[in-house]
Each structure stands twice: as C-alpha cells, then as structure tokens.
Image (cartoon, helix red, strand yellow):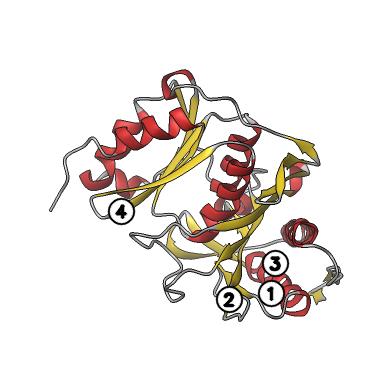
Amino acid sequence: MTTGRHTATELDPSLDDYQLASALVREAGQLALLMRMGGLQGTRKTSVSDVVTAADHAAEAYVLEQLQRCRPEDGILGEEGTSVAGTSGRTWVIDPVDGTYNFLHGSTYWCSAIAVKRDDSDPSDHRVNPVADPDVLLGAIYQPELDKLWLGGDEHPASLNGEPISGSGDLPVGQICAATYIHPTWLADPRTAMPWHAAAVSAASLRMFGSGSCDLGRVADGELGCWFQHSCPEWDWLPGKAIVRAAGGDTAVVQVNGLNWFIAGGPTAVGELSAALTSVPQFA
C-alpha cells in the first residue's frame, strides 16, 4: 500500500492474531511517524486539544486494507470513521494515533493501538454503553518513537517487546501513582469534577500525559500504578484493558451521574478507585 510517498507493508494472512495485531500497530505507527516528519497540520474535531491529522486517516486506511484482506470475516471499527460489519462474531477496534495532540506537537507520548473484541448485543453503539464493557480477546499498543510494543490477551501473557510484564503489584492507591485524563471543561461540571477529585486525592501522585493507551501499557508493565478516566470510547479502552488483564491486573467500569468511568490497575487499587468515584453525591 502506498500513501503519498510512504509505502507500508502488505501483511501475510497466515499470521496468527497476535502476530497480525503486532504488525498492524507497528506499521501504522511508523507510517504516522514518517508522515509527521514530512510535515502535518491538524484539524480541530471537538476542541483545540481534540484534533485529527492526515496521518490518523492514512494509518487507519492502512489497517483497514490489511484487515479486509487478512481477516475478511471480522468486523472493523476505527476512531476515524471505519465501520465494517463482520460475520465471525469478532471486531477489530483501531486507534491509528492515540494522543494526536501530543503527536502533532512533537511529543513522543503517542501510539497506535488495536484490540479484538467479541461483538456485543448492540453493534450500533460502539462508544460508552451504560451497561456493557465488551469482552476483549487481545490488545496491542505500539509507541513508535520509543520502539515499545505492548501485547497481551486471553491466549498470550502480557509482554513489552517480547519480555514478560506483570504490573506493579497489588498495592493501595495511596501508595502508587495514578495516571488520568480529564478535559478542563469537564472540571467545571460537578457531575465529573466531584468523582474525579475524589479519586485523584486518594492517589500518592498523579500523572496526566494525554494518551490512554500509552498509560495503560505502563500500568501493565508497572511504570504506572493505576489509571482512571471517564467516557472512553472502545478504541481508547480495549487495547489497554486486554494487556492490563493479561499482566495479572484488574479493570472495572463504574457509572457515576450517568457517565462511565474506566479503571485499571491491581485489584486493590481498582476497588479503591471504584469506591472513591462512586462515593460522591449523585445528580438527578
């Protein structure tokens, strides 16, 4: 496949799902990086910090083309608009560039991510379903500029660049670092500000880097202790969820004031964050 002056690899359909996912995120990430080196501009989506670039679209188009050739019976869902119904009961969920604001502004803290999920009962709702947290089979996350590839799932122990990882242990939130993200506009809304504050003050320290999948990879390998964020679309949640769980960690989704909060870490931290988020007054 050729995108502009960049040529990406045609992948072998005989690769197993983990090999294919690894190759897809690696190729998509490298394609995006090469395009950034050639010069890019961003287009605002919902806010000045929510942007999309030609690299997002090109990387997603590459993954779509490869999956339609290598896994023609599977569904495909992408952040930048891809939606292909499948017949296998499985869907590949694509985030071609997670952390686009970071990517556009020269930071290394961005990645390409992909997951395979079992199809849910409502295929038209791929974002925040108030009752469903889809069953994820595998996840792969690649941070190109640091050459870090996290991989894990039901049939593959979590790994970073092929080496086993197992999180930071089962410690209370008060003893570990919590990664999170909340847009400033949400901090002006007590429906989100109050639960976020309750969880944030329970942690030993906070980090806010701007790429949920990069954060979740680091929860899986132990660099970060735990993570929480509200209203995550599936492409921001499922790749990291699969890897955290494959590393022996826990995940949860809790609803507060009509919004879902997504949590990952050791079992104790996940339980404590869940309790903190749900401890605040509920608004009608």
Question: Mark on residue 64?
Answer: 1
> Disc 3 and disc 4: Cα gap in Å?
30 Å
Residue at image mark 4: 259
Looking at the image, residue 233 lies above or below residue 54: above
Q: Secondary structure at mark 2?
A: loop
Q: Which residue position holds label 3?
A: 59
Q: Are marks 3 and 4 in contact (CB under 8 Å)?
A: no
Mark 4 or mark 1, which has the lower sequence index? 1
The spot of residue 32 in percent (x, y) is 72, 60
The residue type indicated by label 3 comes to: Ala
- The local crowd at label 1, few if under 14, some if 14 to 19, many if 20 or more residues have their Cα within 10 Å, is many
| Front residue of 206 and 43 | 206
In three-dimensional space, the C-alpha distance between marks 4 and 1, rounded to whole angstroms, equals 30 Å
Residue 117 point in image, percent of width and height = 58, 63
Q: CA distance from mark 1 to mark 2?
A: 8 Å
**Going from the N terminus, do you reach mark 2 or mark 3 first?**
3
The first of marks 4 and 2 along the sequence is 2
Q: Say the numbered circle drawn on residue 81.
A: none
Q: Are marks 2 and 3 in contact (CB under 8 Å)?
A: no
Compare marks 1 and 3 and give the one earlier in the sequence: 3
Q: Residue at image x 28%, y 39%? A: 195
Residue type for callout 1: Leu
